[in-house]
Amino acid sequence: MQVDGKHYRTIWVHPEDDSVIQIIDQRHLPHQFVIEDLTSVTGVALAIRDMHVRGAGLIGATAGYGMYLAALHDASDNNLKKASRELTQTRPTAVNLSWAVDRQLKAIAQADSTVDRIQVARQTAEDIANEDVDYCRSIGEYGLELIRKLAKEKGSGPLHILTHCNAGWLAFVDHGSATAPMYAAHDAGIDIHVWVDETRPRNQGARLTAWELGQHGVAHTVIPDNTGGHLMQHGLVDLVLTGTDRTTSSGDVVNKIGTYLKALAARDNDIPFYVALPSSTFDWKIKDALAEVPIEQRGADEVAMIQGLNEGQLKKVLITPPDSPLANYAFDVTPANLVTGLITERGICAANRESIGRLFPEYVINH
Ligand code: MRU
């Protein structure tokens, strides 16, 4: 992804010191572009928990590099197990985190010597990141065809796409899931316009998706979270396209809080509701998302406070009565019956076990 004309991934190994992992600290965006050095598992865990990095794919990639740092410091089984626990405890909902840590543990277990273990951990972290990039690029290609078809059916005027939260480049290593088709469509000369839900309480839409789309030159408008239903009723949304933090093999979608309400409104207005995801975001083991997926509850301060730029400084201000009780559920479940389709790196399928199984038989058939 280009930032002021320079290509960046969201995470990489320091070019001059391979004991340092570099990330973009997303807490400062869109107002400041800050690169942070990570040198220990504890630093990586903090960066995930406090959302210096966030988004399903990037959490997974960061955990992968975290396991590499763990091996670099002490490649013993004990230390790697400890590191895996420290990393997986940071955030409970996005399945990419445990998927990446498990993949590292299995890969490292194949190597004996310390040198080999470090080498395998580094290679596996790079593989996870590179696959993330390839899969998102592929999602972009499949999603482009969907957008092309919808734009053709519409005939004239921009195709209006509504998105929620940030399932963009910043939520992955590059391209993004929900944004990849938008970038591909824009690059192909298709006239699109994106409604960006602000996504309270952390405003990933207003701060991150809007910034990304702006960097790429994609027409967009930031809207308060409650606006989508009104726009849909007035024919101003042609497609809803979101990401997901975990999706079951029967097509239930766990995503940023508020997604479910957008899916209900889309159904009521006959608007296609698509979800883009790489295969690392499927949880092949669970059957019932509502019963089995842990929904993260974050600190009350995220609801009570809002952050913005004031006279050149990032400031937080209090917006609630100081004593009001607050709740901060970070994700919700959109049942498969409200999802028109899933855009994956292997193609687009319906949100049900049969269709998902046709694209991913090696995972679905055997469970
Ligand atoms: O809490 P976050 O910012 O890590 O939430 C993740 C998200 O950005 C969204 O839920 C997104 O749609 C899915 S992540 C690709």
Image (cartoon, rainbow, N blue to C red):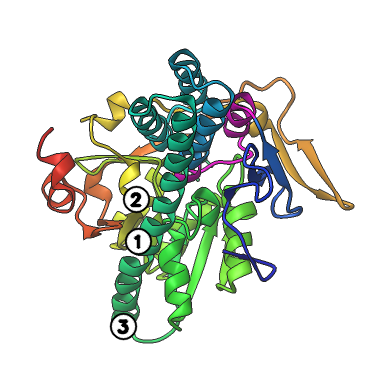
In front here: 293 or 115?
Answer: 115
**Is the residue 54 above or below the residue 209 in the image?**
above
- At mark 3, the secondary structure is helix
Q: Are marks 2 and 1 in contact (CB under 8 Å)?
A: yes
Residue at 43% x, 36% y is: 120
Q: Position of residue 202 (x, y in %)?
A: 61, 41
Tell me, yes or no, whether the highlighted magenta stretch contains residue 51: yes
**Is the residue 64 above or below the residue 272 in the image?**
above
**Is the residue 67 above or below the residue 153 in the image?**
above
Identify which amino acid the numbered label 1 is placed on.
Answer: Ile
Q: Position of residue 234 (x, y in %)?
A: 42, 68
Mark 2 → mark 1, Cα distance in angstroms: 7 Å
The outermost residue toward the top is 78
In the drawing, what numbered circle is on residue 278?
Answer: 2
In the drawing, what numbered circle is on residue 152?
Answer: 3
Q: Quadrant of residue 235?
A: bottom left
Compared across the picture, whether 135 is left or right of 365 comes to right
The residue pinned by badge 1 equals 139
Q: Which stretch is magenta?
A: 40-58
